[in-house]
């Protein structure tokens, strides 16, 4: 059971940052995964009054507030076009609409959960996070860092040419994924991220030379196998390491071929 001793609706980022320095205090976000924990929180910090629930578009990027919900991401036309529908595809299986109306982007990326669909996708989008104290950090670097007591305020997604696709394997619909895969095919090469291994998502280059003659079912198979050979897999209650190792090249192949179809 989650026990909260004090609730504070922060009126500035400085106030939220100061409060979160105490280990027993916590930023709420959407408070969906948090409430499943058995813990006591001294001060729960709500960021709802800080204007972090908007998606801003500039000529070069989308700047997404940490309190933007998964449902907002799912329905945003600009992000849908930029990601070739992959963003909506990545969040649509997450529990249900009621859940996605509450769960936030900042909560998912700050937590860097191993099962995070969004972390997997945003890695191939070359996203960066903006931290109140730590400044702007590439998401790939941020995901590899140990947890720190800072406020994630925005996520910046640059506008880049190319195609993007997302695929995941779930034991049943709306369950936490067994394995996640995102692929971005850019003029300068292919980016591939694998998550829910069950560890958190990371980028894996694969053997780019296998796609030198273009994306075909055969080259996609070979590239998927090269990615799977680089990924360390583990086991948990949802699946074993060997099962994930077998599924990985299949997801990579499907994502690559989906990118070709979009082209």
Image (cartoon, helix red, strand yellow):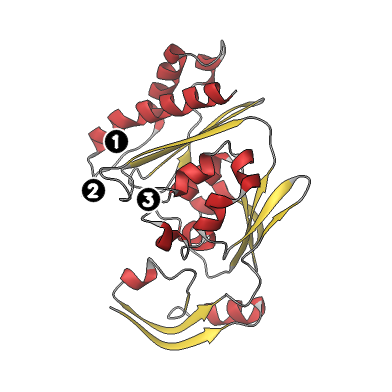
Q: Which residue is mark 1?
A: 244
Q: Position of residue 165 (x, y in %)?
A: 51, 34
- 61 above or below 110? above
Quick check: 98 left or right of 175?
right
Q: Residue at x 60, y 23 (%)?
A: 263
Q: Residue 212's quadrant in the figure?
A: top right
Q: Nearest the camera: 198 or 122?
A: 122
Q: Nearest the camera: 246 or 134?
A: 246
What whole-number distance in Å separates the C-alpha atoms at marks 1 and 3?
Answer: 13 Å
Question: Label 3's element?
Answer: loop
Q: Nearest the camera: 206 or 165?
A: 165
Q: Residue at x 28, y 75 (%)?
A: 38
User: Mark 1–mark 2 contact, CB under 8 Å?
Assistant: no
- 2 above or below 95? below
Q: Residue at x 39, y 30 (%)?
A: 251
Q: Which residue is mark 3?
A: 115
Q: Which residue is mark 2?
A: 236
Query: Dot 3, how many residues are within 10 Å of its Cα: few (below 14), some (14-19), or many (20+)?
Result: many
What whole-number distance in Å separates the C-alpha atoms at marks 2 and 3?
Answer: 12 Å
- Choose the circle earlier in sequence order: 2 or 3: 3
Q: Position of residue 161 (x, y in %)?
A: 68, 32
């Amino acid at each position: 059971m989650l026990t909260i001793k004090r609730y504070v609706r922060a009126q500035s980022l400085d106030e939220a940052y100061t409060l979160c320095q105490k280990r027993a205090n916590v930023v709420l976000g959407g408070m969906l995964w948090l409430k499943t924990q058995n813990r006591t929180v001294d001060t729960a910090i709500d960021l709802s009054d800080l204007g972090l629930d908007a998606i801003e578009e500039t000529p070069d990027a989308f700047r997404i507030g940490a309190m933007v919900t998964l449902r907002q991401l799912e329905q945003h036309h600009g992000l849908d076009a930029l990601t070739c529908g992959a963003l909506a595809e990545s969040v649509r299986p997450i529990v249900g609409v009621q859940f996605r109306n509450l769960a936030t982007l900042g909560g998912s990326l700050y937590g860097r959960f191993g099962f995070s669909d969004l972390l997997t996708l945003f890695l191939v989008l070359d996203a960066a996070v903006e931290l109140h104290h730590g400044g702007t950090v590439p998401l790939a670097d941020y995901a590899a860092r140990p947890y720190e007591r800072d406020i994630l305020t925005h996520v910046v997604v640059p506008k880049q040419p190319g195609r993007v696709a997302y695929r995941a394997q779930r034991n049943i619909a709306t369950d936490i994924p067994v394995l996640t895969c995102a692929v971005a095919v850019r003029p300068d090469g292919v980016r591939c991220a694998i998550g829910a291994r069950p560890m958190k998502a990371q980028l894996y280059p694969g053997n780019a030379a296998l796609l030198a003659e273009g994306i075909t079912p055969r080259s996609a198979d070979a590239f998927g196998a090269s990615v799977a050979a680089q990924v360390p897999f583990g086991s948990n209650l949802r699946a074993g390491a060997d099962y994930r190792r077998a599924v990985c090249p299949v997801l990579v192949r499907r994502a690559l071929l989906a990118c070709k179809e979009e082209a």
